[in-house]
Image (cartoon, helix red, strand yellow):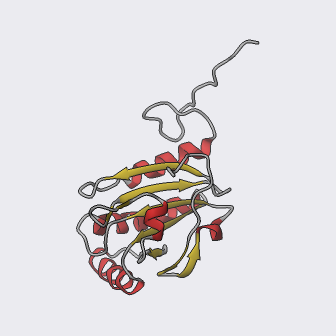
Amino acid sequence: MPLQLGQPAPDFTLKSTKGKISLSDYKGKWVVLFTHPADFTPICSTEVPEFARRSNEFEKLNAQLIGASVDSVFSHIAWIKDLEKSTGVKIDYPIVADINKELAKKYQVYDEESGLTYRGVFIIDPEGKLQYALYHPMQMGRSVEEILRVLKALQTGGLTPAEWKPGEPLLEEPKTEI
């Protein structure tokens, strides 16, 4: 069944670099869940520290970052140590170990034919409803700036025009006559 915006996001309970976590642990917060194909890969190794570099911006927006891939917690920890050493950036958000591809299947980032997972970004509101989903091909990195912009736009509760940036005016609701 396809994921649908405005519907409850699929819950999960999995081991992570911060212990066992569930999506439902974060009720009352926005969640930015991002999946990546594997640890120690070139593109993922640029994205994970960039999310960490901007993590305080997500925190100010009452948003919890959660990374996920099919590698083990032990692999995640080794990779995080390597990334922190090479980038000088502390990676303080959890990265989920989706070894059985449970999360990847629920969030539809698993390709049965190749057995690979790809990049996905999912923004879940404080009530646990999916508000945004974006899929990226294996060879393309994500823009953390754009993900922050989308989160801010969702939090306005209003109509945001193309290329909207925080602080710019919102569009007016269409007026209907009865």
Image coords of residue 163 (percent x, y): 42, 34
Q: Is residue 20 above or below residue 52?
A: below
Q: Is residue 17 left or right of residue 36?
A: right
The image quadrant that residue 174 belongs to is top right
Residue located 29% across and 61% down the image: 113
The residue at 49%/75% (across/down) is: 94
- Picture coordinates of residue 81, whole percent (x, y): 34, 83
Farthest residue to the top: give it.
177
Q: Quadrant of residue 156?
A: top right
Q: Nearer the viewer, residue 73 or 80?
A: 73
Residue 54: tell me if it is visible. Answer: no
Side of 60 relative to 74 (left or right): right
In the orientation shown, which residue stands out farthest toward the right?
178
119 or 17, nearer to the observer: 119
Quarter of image, res 24: bottom right
- Total labels drawn: 0
Instruction: Give the percent coordinates (x, y) of residue 101.
Output: 42, 71
Q: Can residue 148 be seen in this view?
A: yes
* Residue 149 x, y percent position in the rendering: 47, 46
Residue placed at 47% from the left, 51% from the top? 148
Q: In this view, does 31 lie to the left or right of 77?
A: right
For the point 43% across and 57% down, the residue is 108
Q: In which quarter of the image is the C terminus?
A: top right
- Asked if residue 106 lies left or right of residue 110, the reply is right
